Image (cartoon, grey):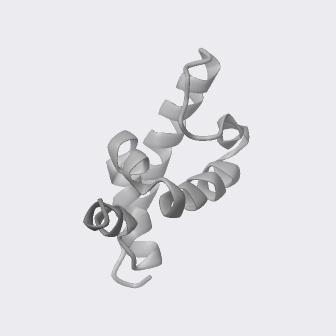
Amino acid sequence: HRDMRRSEWTAAWSDAYADFCRRADVDEDLAIDPYAAESPAEFFAVLSEAFFEIPRLILADYPAVYSQLRLFYRQDPATRAAMHL
């Protein structure tokens, strides 16, 4: 979207993908499907799905990515989920 900054998107996703791949490589127990480490495109797809299904975990593990997804999808499912607790 026009109101998003490409540099912030790139930094958030690059850092998160590198961290996730490192964690997957050492067989860390991950709440997110390890298949996300296959490629940056799969990482985006898996985290997009997780954003709607387990938003609070994405927010906890990768807050910068959560912020970018919130802007991209124009939704805030973690806040909505917290309101229903």
Q: In the rendered image, which quarter contains the N terminus?
A: bottom left
Residue 11 visible, this angle: no
Q: Residue at x 38, y 69 (%)?
A: 70
Q: Quadrant of residue 57?
A: top left
Q: In this view, does 17 lie above or below 13?
A: above
Residue 55 visible, this angle: yes
Residue 77 at x, y percent in the picture: 39, 67
In front here: 8 or 66? 66
In front here: 48 or 80? 80
Q: Which residue is drawn at 69% across and 51% down?
A: 42
- Most distant residue in the front direction: 85
- Most distant residue in the bottom direction: 2
Q: In this view, does 44 lie to the left or right of 35?
A: left
Residue 16 at x, y percent in the picture: 46, 41
Q: In this view, does 46 lie above or below 23?
A: below
Q: In the rendered image, which quarter contains the C terminus?
A: bottom left
Query: Disc count in the image?
Result: 0
Residue 38 at x, y percent in the picture: 73, 39
Q: Is residue 82 left or right of residue 68?
A: left
